[in-house]
Image: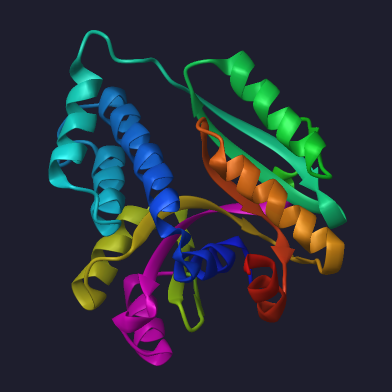
Amino acid sequence: MAGHSQFKNIMHKKGRQDAIRSKLFSKLSREITVAAKSGLPDPNMNPRLRLAVANAKAESMPKDVIERAIKKATGGDAETYDEIRYEGFGPGGVGVIVEVLTDNRNRAAANVRAIFSKNGGNMGETGAVSFMFDRVGQIVYPASAGSEEKVMEAAIEAGADDVESDEESHTIYTAFEQLSEVAQALEAALGEPKSTAIAWRPKTLTPVSGDAAATLMKLLDALEDDDDVQNVWGNYDIAADELERLAS
């Protein structure tokens, strides 16, 4: 399976990482603030905040930036963010799920709808796409964490459900209710992961190529580039060589 994360990895290698990292830090900071505001501002007492901080550290976010994001949640002038899920279809009939954290619901809805329509897609009603996905826990390790066999063995011991490995990374899936428990067991065996998240995993994949693949990548890039959008998920499959071409 090849997808947008691989497309992003190729872009990183081609020298576009600075802009991507800046946008990523902004999204990670927002998630930390929302997580801290949703419970106690102490990662040890707030599982969602602990997860957000761990993901920020995995992306080498500076400690002072993380602390500022937490403190922002306790300030009287902290923004109130709404968590919204939009669903739609992209080129080639691909199902797309967009997760948003926004302080302006009308702006977010208008922007997401416009991005879909300008890039060969269309928004659907809630539930129009999500039935094609499973809600799962997702733990990602770099390929350097170990061989496919080593990671598979650790995942089985930790109680995970599945592992997908490629030259870039190992992606481990588990029931989302067991994410924290499995992540802790994996950390003991493999060290700290690159990311840990609740994810939307496609039940089946839709092959996409040619012009449809190019337009789909533009759609996904435009969605991820929007300030309100936190995560984008799709049930597409694009060949690795085509991803290389599209990222060039």
Quarter placement of the N terminus: bottom right
Q: In which quarter of the image is residue 225?
A: top right
- Residue at the location (42% across, 88% down)? 148
Does any portion of residue 4 appear in the rendered image?
Answer: yes
Q: Quadrant of residue 138?
A: bottom left
Residue nearer the viewer, 142 or 198: 142
- Residue at the location (69% across, 73% down)? 245
Quick check: 85 left or right of 13?
A: right
Q: In which quarter of the image is residue 44?
A: top left
Does any portion of residue 128 appear in the rendered image?
Answer: no
Give coordinates of residue 234: x percent, y percent: 67, 54
Quick check: 72 left or right of 206?
A: left
Give coordinates of residue 248: x percent, y percent: 63, 69
* 24 within the magenta span: no
- Residue at the location (63% across, 66% down)? 247
Instruction: Classify 1 as above or below 30.
Output: below
Residue nearer the viewer, 127 or 76: 76
Span colored in magenta: 132-160
Total numbered labels placed on residues in the image: 0
Quick check: 198 left or right of 34?
A: right
- Residue at the location (84% across, 68% down)? 210
Instruction: Classify 143 as above or below 206.
Output: below
